[in-house]
Amino acid sequence: LECDLAMNLVGQPLVRQQVMKGLREFLENRNPVKPLVMSFHGSTGTGKTYVSSMIVRYLFQGGLQSPYVHQFSPIVHFPHAERIEQYKESLKRWIQGNLTNCGRSAFLFDEMDKMHPGLIDVIIPFLGPSWVVYGTNYRKAIFIFISNAGGEQINEMTLDLWRARKDREEISLQDLAPAISKAVFENPQSGFWKSGIINEHLIDFVVPFLPLKRHHVKQCVISELVQQGLEVRPGVVQEVADSIPYFPEEEKIFSSTGCKTVTSRISFFF
């Protein structure tokens, strides 16, 4: 996994470091005191979903298709605000049932920024350091929250640091943590709004995904061409990278969509 992250995850040194630290400490401990809880933040196309699917691919046979990996999307699973009580009940039962089947399960919560506030708190008993909940030892489970919330603040901070001539390899979690906190945990629109998960400090690793620069986008184009078995032509790489919008307006430093639209754009230029 570490090697794959180093080779294929572009422009995210902080992510590699945090994810590997979290997984290594957790998996090397035969009796963890609580489940591993990670929260991924950043704007579109920076690698959040990519990294979470990579983690489960290495930890579970069948990856996302494994019966022990469970994905939730607010738009798919919890679309109606008026049915929140019903969702709470079914989510609690679902997690409890699956942890009873296998304590080493993984739960991925997509688009936490679109989750109804209050809903996620129903899983608090499964995230803390108790011995057993509802008769099940669940402390070997992994929970990953994925969110675009905080993306704007991470982008602004990265831009400020770039203007201050600070290399992205030098950006630390301390540089970004306050901004993420404000955007994610103090925002009434966020799924984490006034959440006990935050108040009880149940998230072990907050992982910020930085905006990607033009040369990172080019790396994504090259790796996509290789994956599709196409010839890597410098002209095509340049054209695809140039077709993507960049911000801020004047300097055009960072890709507005990360690497998200690279795959669909390649066909236009090949």
Image: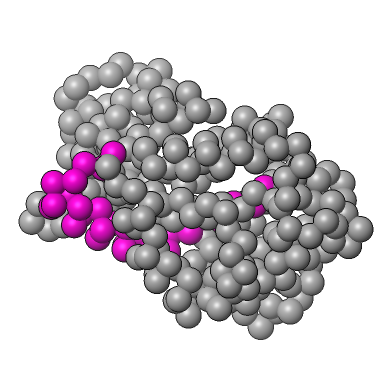
User: In the image, which residues are magenta?
Assistant: 142-169
Q: Is residue 195 above or below residue 58?
A: below
Residue 60 in sight: yes
Q: Position of residue 4 (x, y in %)?
A: 48, 26
| Quadrant of image for the C terminus | top left
Residue 126 image position (x, y, % from top left): 75, 60
Q: How many marks?
A: 0
Asked if residue 267 can be seen in this view, the reply is no
Residue beneath the point at 34% across and 48% down: 172
Determine whether, in the image, residue 237 is placed left or right of residue 93. Answer: left
Spot occupied by residue 61 in the image (x, y as percentages of width and height): 71, 29
Q: Is residue 163 magenta?
A: yes
In screen coordinates, is 245 left or right of 230? left
Residue 210 is covered by the magenta coloring: no
179 or 209, which lies in front?
179
Residue 138 percent coordinates (x, y): 79, 51
138 to 243, vertically: above or below: below
Residue visible at 73% across and 58% down in the picture: 129
Residue at (63, 77) in percent of width and height: 118
